[in-house]
Amino acid sequence: MSWLQDAEVTMPKTPAELLAEAQAAKTKQINAAYSEQAEPLVRDYPEVEQQSWTEQNREARAYLEWHASPQGDAPATPVLDNILIGRNGEDGTETLAELSEAVVGNAERFTQFQQLTGRRQRLVKQVRAAETVAAVDAIEW
């Protein structure tokens, strides 16, 4: 065997490989900055609770619309009803309207946060479209 066959040779990375590495690192950096800003909004809520937010919001908005002009039967609010039972316990006084207002208020804060979701998506799109490492490096959160 020749020394060349036995030697470990590391070839320099191609420009395409360097660009792909820079893009992956920048995407990771953007996602971390986004998550850092999202964390204060969600840190006090377990993931399993977060999974019910869409339904909570839907029920709360339907109930508040009905509550403002009660005609016919109130809409079904099984998720909120059960949350209210848990929140009130044996002697609580929170009403479905109060809970619904709180849910809608939280939902509106999260909706406003989606501007940052759009920003994250825009920046990642720019990273993917960048053709040089310098162009990737110029993209900032």
Image (cartoon, rainbow, N blue to C red):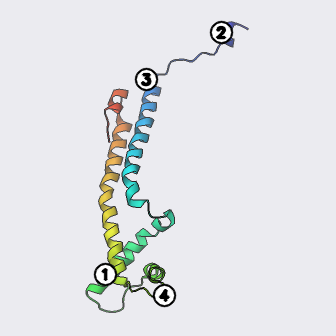
The residue carrying mark 1 is: 64
Q: CA distance from mark 1 to mark 4?
A: 25 Å
Instruction: Please name the residue that numbered disc 4 is placed on.
Output: 90
- Pointer 2 residue: 4
Q: Amino acid type of disc 4?
A: Glu
Q: Of circles 2 and 4, which is in front?
A: 4
* Residue 73: quadrant of the picture: bottom left
Q: Residues within 10 Å of mark 3 (few under 14, many from 20)?
A: few
Ranked by sequence position, the earlier of labels 2 and 4 is: 2
Which numbered disc, 1 or 4, marks the residue that appears first in the sequence?
1
From where the camera sits, is residue 132 visible? no
* Residue 72 appears in the figure: yes
Q: Secondary structure at mark 3?
A: helix
Confirm or deny contact between disc 3 and disc 2 (CB under 8 A): no
CA gap, disc 3 to disc 2? 25 Å
Mark 2 in CB contact with mark 4 (< 8 angstroms): no
Q: Residue furthest right?
A: 1
Mark 3 lies on residue: 15
* Residue 104 position (above or below residue 15): below
